[in-house]
Every structure is written in C-alpha cells, then in structure tokens.
Image (spheres, helix red, strand yellow):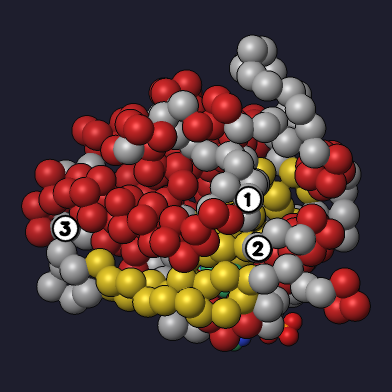
C-alpha cells in the first residue's frame, strides 16, 4: 500500500511520543470541533488547501469516512502490505468475507483518524480516488484519536501473528525509517499515508490531482513530502511527481517477504513551480 498506516499507529506502541500531536500546530480547518482545547494556530497555506475545492479535489467531512475508506479498501484489496496483517497462518480458517471485512475496518479506522488529525481528500464521482495525508507536525498518536477512530480495536481484531506483524514489526520499522531518512525534517514534511483510486476509476488522472493538490502547497512552503510504497509499479508513478527512492525496507515475518520503497520528494525550486 502506500502504506501508510505508519503515522496512525506509531503512537500506539510509542508512548514516548504520545503528547506530540497535542503540541502540534492545528493547521487544518474542521467543522467538528471535538478538540476544543487544542492549539488553534493556523498556517495559511494549509488552511486554504483544506477549505476550497481545487481542480475537482475536495476535503471530505468526517461523516464521509466510510465512503472514502471503501474506495481505499477496493484500491488496496490486493496490496501486499494490507494483506500482510490479515493473511496470517493463524487466520487460515477465516473466510474471504471475514478477511475483507477486517480489511475494510482497518481502512475505516485509519481514514477516520485522518479526518480527525490529518487531511483526507477525494476527487471524482463516488469517491473515485482518495488520499490520506498527515500534514507537517501532525500525527495520530494521541489517545483521543486512537479511541475515537477505532484504531484501538486492532488490538483484538488482529490475530496474534497479525498483531506481532503490525505492532512490533511494521509500525516501529516505519516510524524509525521515517525519522532516520527525514531527520530534523520529520516534523515538517507532508506525509502521504495512503492514496488509492477505485479500480473502475483508474487512468483518469485522479491520483495526479490528489498528489499535486498537496505538492503545490509543499513547494510553496518549501517542505519535503514522504511516502512508503509497497507496489513495484508505484515508484515509477511517484517519480512523475518528483519523488525519489531513498531506501528499501522489508517486512520479514511472512514466508514471502514484503518490500517497501521509501520515497521523498524535495520541494521544487521556485523556478520550477
Ligand atoms: C496507483 C494508483 C493510485 C494510480 O491512480 P490513477 O488515478 O489511475 O492514476 P492517474 O490516472 O492519476 O495517473 C498518474 C500517472 O501515473 C501513471 N500511471 C498510473 N497507473 C500506472 C501504472 N499501472 N503503470 C504505469 N504508470 C501508471 C499515469 O500514466 C499517469 O502519468 P501521466 O500523468 O504522466 O500520464 C491506482 O492505480 C491505485 O489505487 N493502485 C492501487 C493502490 C496503490 O498502489 N496505491 C498507491 C499508489 S501510487
């Protein structure tokens, strides 16, 4: 996947960072002010991005999270990383429907968490494509987000092996890798956690619109963009948008390992914007 469960769940296992999100600047305008005491400083560029329809791209409201998650579930139905936590030996007895339902649930938790703390954009009819972004300085580590989004349910929805893969292998690896690659920029980069286009809507330029909607802002703010990619084809696509592979990492608990490309997009020089 453009797997990006990373940001969401890092905090579930990394208690040391649990307060970071509460200290971060609130840069996204939201109608559901469930966090009345949170800091309210707003960065102008990001606020604009969240409030206007641009090139057909719009920010979804929180009551649309299920539709948005459904798009991602369909886009990532065969994704090696998405399946890594579900297709475990101790779930061999589960039906395809049970596995699909779990896959959809995971997408719903993560999408909801991004509605709360990140940025969820869509383009095209019927949520043709959806992107989950974590803006600079934001994360989903706080208890409030973990509880409200349902992410905490993964503790009992995943099998024993699924939990080992997710909590003790995947999340720490993604967290440490992001920090190691971005260094001091870890808190100031845009993070593309997931992007997916419904199989019936691919090839219409939707992913391009969703990505460029944010990379334009990243360029103006001179910020890097970061992502992890789990599909062989994707690095080629991301290179079109200025991302470059910085490292390859591996998930190794399954019989067949899963490789992820870590990609970073540097802000474009002014002349290129
Ligand atoms: C990858 C994915 C998001 C592309 O979505 P999309 O809406 O079809 O992409 P776009 O139509 O905006 O295409 C963007 C560019 O990538 C290229 N591209 C898209 N799919 C491609 C593929 N399978 N192989 C090669 N190039 C591809 C397009 O030609 C286009 O380039 P261009 O603008 O220079 O012509 C979609 O196929 C998907 O959801 N895949 C499964 C989930 C996933 O892997 N997500 C992470 C993806 S990057």
Determine whether label 1 and label 2 are within 8 Å by CB. Answer: yes
Q: Quadrant of the N terminus?
A: bottom left
Residue at image location 16% in from the left, 58% down from the top: 88
Please identify the residue farthest to the top as the structure is shown: 37
Can you tell which mark lies on residue 224? 2
For residue 222, side relative to residue 23 (left or right): right
State whether residue 244 is above or below residue 206: below
Determine whether 235 is above or below 228 in the image: below
Residue 203 position within the rendered picture, expressed as x and y whole percent measured from the top left: 68, 78
Q: Name which of mark 1 and mark 3 comes first in the sequence.
A: 3
What x and y, as percent, mark residue 265?
64, 71
Residue at point 73%, 36% (across, down) = 27
Image position of 84 (left or right of 240): left
Residue pictured at 70% horizontal, 59% vertical:
223
| In the foreground, 106 or 132 | 132
Q: CA distance from mark 1 to mark 2?
A: 8 Å
Residue contact at pointers 1 and 3, CB within 8 angstroms: no
Is 101 positioned to the left or the right of 132 in the image?
Answer: left
- Left or right of 236 on screen, residue 206: right
* Residue closest to the eye, 125 or 49: 49
Residue ID for mark 1 = 188
Q: Which residue is mark 3?
A: 88
The reply to whether the residue tagged 3 has its Cβ within 8 angstroms of ligand 1 is no
Instruction: Please tell me in which quarter of the rendered image ligand 1 is found.
Output: bottom right
């Amino acid at each position: 996947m453009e797997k990006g469960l990373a940001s969401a769940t890092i905090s579930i296992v990394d208690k040391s960072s649990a307060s970071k999100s509460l200290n971060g600047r609130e840069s996204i305008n939201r109608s559901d002010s469930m966090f009345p005491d949170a800091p309210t400083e707003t960065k102008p560029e990001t606020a604009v991005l969240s409030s206007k329809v641009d090139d057909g791209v719009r920010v979804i409201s929180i009551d649309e999270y299920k539709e948005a998650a459904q798009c991602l579930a369909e886009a990532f139905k065969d994704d090696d990383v998405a399946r890594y936590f579900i297709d475990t030996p101790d779930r061999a007895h589960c039906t395809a429907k049970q596995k699909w339902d779990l896959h959809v649930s995971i997408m719903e938790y993560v999408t909801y968490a991004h509605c709360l703390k990140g940025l969820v954009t869509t383009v095209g009819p019927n949520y043709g494509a959806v992107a989950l972004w974590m803006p600079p300085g934001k994360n989903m580590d706080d208890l409030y987000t973990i509880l409200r989004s349902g992410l905490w349910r993964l503790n009992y929805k995943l099998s024993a092996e699924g939990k080992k893969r997710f909590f003790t292998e995947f999340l720490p690896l993604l967290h440490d890798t992001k920090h190691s690659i971005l260094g001091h920029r870890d808190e100031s980069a845009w993070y593309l956690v997931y992007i997916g286009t419904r199989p019936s809507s691919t090839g219409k330029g939707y992913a391009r619109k969703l990505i460029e909607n944010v990379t334009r802002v990243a360029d103006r703010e001179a910020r890097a963009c970061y992502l992890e990619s789990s599909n062989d084809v994707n690095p080629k696509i991301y290179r079109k948008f200025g991302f470059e592979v910085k490292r390859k990492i591996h998930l190794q608990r399954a019989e067949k390992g899963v490789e992820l490309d870590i990609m970073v997009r540097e802000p474009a020089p002014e002349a290129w914007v």
